[in-house]
Image: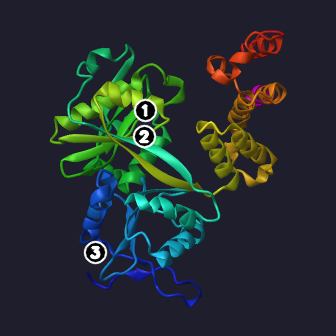
């Protein structure tokens, strides 16, 4: 390994503990990621088909290694390297959260790791923020289950390869998310067209669902799926993903990977209908730069863990945060936070606060009658007049 590596951080004349490797050195450290290679993006970064960076504790004999990619961050090697861990903490808050990231405008850092003992170091790495757990699933498809997907494409819809011809179709409305995905994961649309793959579902002149490869390496690839909100819950994502998998498995790829959160039931449902099989459950830790956003995610994590009082208290802190300290998208979604707070207070048996926050959720734009009715925390209210009045408001009826 050459000493082309460049030093990126050295605070207060401390000993040098983090070096960024030159891309020509990446292959030399592949073995350090052996236990994390189910994340295909690691191989893609090492091979140079996806943007990324790699940092080590020592350029000659590395023992601790940190890889940054557009799909996440990965730690491996010697765990008890306190100097490296503390320096990584500074990196996160002084470098990455200052905007120097692989993915443009990244707002959070999510770290996968091996060995498992890295979990004990997350508090140091993310200090002063409390690190949050992300329970994840890894699926692999080697044989398509939805073999008859072509016959199920609804009338008025069609599925096409995401190629140069499609991108240049006159009058076609292509969501920015599609081209951003290509640019972000492949470096440019040109590189995607040369090395990547994907399929889009069209309705009239609109791309309404798209499944695009996150990365490829050898005879393996990983894909994702996204559907325009107005076209969800129609089975379109399953058909689009099936088209992509069908193409992959008939074009030399022997396996197609899929990653999603444990709580993303929609993604899980699509994967299993297409033919993906669960390979493993795994854990990541993450931290969000914006404090209010981090508090909201912390509240959600407490709620999922049935720690309802802690969840409610987190949401109260979110509501008390000055709006100028929040991103615009978060303010636009405040109805979600009020609804979650209402569920937490209902679970705690506080009827007054539950209805107060439910009312506020509706005032802020909450309209999902079905989801509200299904919340188990609200069942004790279903026969009350307050509940009937609330449902009438949600359904647009005159109270």
Instruction: Choose the circle earlier in sequence order: 2 or 3.
Output: 3
Q: Position of residue 37 (x, y in %)?
A: 29, 55
* Residue 274 part of the magenta-drawn span: no
Q: Position of residue 264 (x, y in %)?
A: 48, 34
Q: Which residue is mark 2?
A: 260
Asked whether residue 172 appears in the rendered view, the answer is no
Q: Which residue is mark 1?
A: 267
Which residue ends up furthest to the bottom in the rendered image? 13
Could you tell me how far apart the alpha carbons at marks 2 and 3 are, in whole angstroms? 31 Å
What is the secondary structure assignment of the residue under circle 3? helix
Q: Which residues are magenta?
A: 361-365
Q: Which of the two residues, 9 or 62, is positioned nearer the viewer here?
A: 62
Q: Which of the two residues, 253 or 251, is positioned nearer the viewer here?
A: 253
Q: Is residue 269 left or right of residue 374?
A: left
Front of the two marks 2 and 3: 2
- Rendered position, 373 above or below 23: above
- Rendered position, 90 above or below 302: below
Q: Which residue is mark 3?
A: 25
Image marks 2 and 1: residues in contact by CB distance under 8 Å: yes
Q: Position of residue 381 (x, y in %)?
A: 75, 16
């Amino acid at each position: 390994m050459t000493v082309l590596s460049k030093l990126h951080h050295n605070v207060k004349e401390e000993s040098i503990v983090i070096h960024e490797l030159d891309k020509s050195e990446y292959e030399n450290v592949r073995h350090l990621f052996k236990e994390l290679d189910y994340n295909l993006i690691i191989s893609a970064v090492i091979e140079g088909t996806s943007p990324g960076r790699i940092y080590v504790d020592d350029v000659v004999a590395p023992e601790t290694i940190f890889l940054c990619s557009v799909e996440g961050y990965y730690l491996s090697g010697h765990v008890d390297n306190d100097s490296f861990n503390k320096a990584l903490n500074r990196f996160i808050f002084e470098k990455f959260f200052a905007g120097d990231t692989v993915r443009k405008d990244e707002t959070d850092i999510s770290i996968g790791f091996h060995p498992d003992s890295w979990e004990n170091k997350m508090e140091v790495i993310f200090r002063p923020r409390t690190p949050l757990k992300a329970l994840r699933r890894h699926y692999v498809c080697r044989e398509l289950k939805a073999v008859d997907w072509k016959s199920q494409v609804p009338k008025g819809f069609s599925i096409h390869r995401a190629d140069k011809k499609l991108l240049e179709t006159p009058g076609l409305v292509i969501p920015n998310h599609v081209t951003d995905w290509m640019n972000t994961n492949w470096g440019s649309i040109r590189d995607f067209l040369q090395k990547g793959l994907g399929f889009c579902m069209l309705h009239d002149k609109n791309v309404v669902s798209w499944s695009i490869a996150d990365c490829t390496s050898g005879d393996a690839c990983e894909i994702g799926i996204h559907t325009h909100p107005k076209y969800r819950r129609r089975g379109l994502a399953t058909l689009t993903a099936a088209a992509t998998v069908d193409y992959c498995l008939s074009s030399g790829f022997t396996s197609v990977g899929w990653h999603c959160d444990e709580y993303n039931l929609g993604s899980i449902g699509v994967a299993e209908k297409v033919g993906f099989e669960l390979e493993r459950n795994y854990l990541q830790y993450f931290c969000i730069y914006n404090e209010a956003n981090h508090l909201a995610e912390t509240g959600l994590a407490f709620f999922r863990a049935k720690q309802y009082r802690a969840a409610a208290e987190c949401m109260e802190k979110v509501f008390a945060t000055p709006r100028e300290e929040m991103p615009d998208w978060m303010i636009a979604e405040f109805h979600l936070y009020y609804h979650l707070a209402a569920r937490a207070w209902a679970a705690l048996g506080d009827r007054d606060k539950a209805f107060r926050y439910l009312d506020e959720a509706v005032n802020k734009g909450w309209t999902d009658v079905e989801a509200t009715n299904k919340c188990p925390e609200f069942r004790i209210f279903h026969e009350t007049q307050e509940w009937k009045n609330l449902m009438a408001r949600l359904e647009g009826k005159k109270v």
